[in-house]
Image: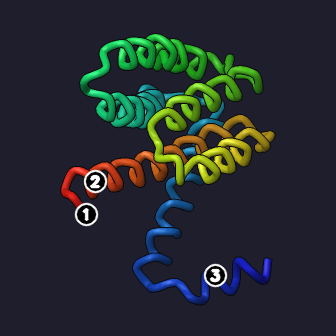
Amino acid sequence: MADLKDHISKMSAENFKELMEKAQTRKKFIDLLESNILTDASVDCVRKMCTSLKQRIQNMTPNRKDLRDSWNTTFDIDLFIQMFRYSAVDVNDANSIVNIVFERIQMLCAPSQDDAVAHAKATVLLEKNISKKLAILLEISNDIVKDIEELAKKFSDGI
């Protein structure tokens, strides 16, 4: 806990603001997932978040139709949304989703990122609360994908 306090005390105001916004977004998403009353808006929000992540990952392999096809088959958002809508996502389903997403991210990341990605996956898999697990999955995987996108851009720019 002392390490966390020390880390936060050394953050810039911009980094702290970003951290707080992520925490608020995660909390809202967890509350949405745990809600007993699902609205069309809440289901659309979950669909939008999953679709965005799926599309960003797919865009990283524009010349590999085989990878895009297998990703589209494996990460079936419509099936997940149906399970979510009817509260049918159990621990095994949530862990399968985590494994699917991280398996693809692992394929896309640089070797220097392998340990961090493996640690992130293990951290998400350890979470017992399904709603929190899925919220953390989306947050962490989006951060990792952002890092991969930035690294790919630097590489293409010759930096």
Q: Which residue is mark 3?
A: 7
Residue 10, image x, y percentages: 57, 88
From mark 3 to mark 1, how far is it between C-alphas?
A: 29 Å
Residue 123: percent from left, percent from top:
72, 48
Q: Position of residue 41 (x, y in %)?
A: 41, 32
Work out how far the residue at label 2 is from the one at label 1, CA to CA, in angstroms.
6 Å
Q: Residues within 10 Å of mark 2 (few under 14, many from 20)?
A: few
Taking the spot 36% from the left edge, 19% from the top edge, the residue there is 68
Q: Nearer the viewer, mark 3 or mark 2?
A: 2
- The one nearer the camera, 137 or 107, is 107
Amino acid of disc 3: His
Secondary element under disc 1, as helix, strand or loop, is loop
Name the spot of residue 45 as percent of width and height, x first.
42, 35
Circles 2, 1 touching at the beta carbon (< 8 Å):
yes
> Mark 1 is on which residue type?
Ile
- Above or below for 97 versus 155: above
Where does the C terminus fall, quadrant-wise?
Answer: bottom left
As drawn, the label of residue 155 is 2
Closer to viewer: mark 3 or mark 1 = 1
Q: Residue at x 47, y 43 (%)?
A: 109
Q: Label 3 crowding class (10 Å Cα cut-off): few <14, some 14-19, many 20+?
A: few
Considering only vertical position in the picture, is 49 above or below 20? above
Which residue is identified by label 1? 159
Q: Can see residue 45?
A: no
Crowd tier of the residue under label 1, counting other residues whose Cα lies within 10 Å: few below 14, some 14–19, many 20 or above = few
Q: Earlier in the sequence, mark 3 or mark 1?
A: 3
Residue 84: name its quadrant.
Answer: top right
Under circle 3, the secondary element is helix
Residue 97 visible? The answer is: yes
> Is residue 8 left or right of 50 when viewed as pictured?
right
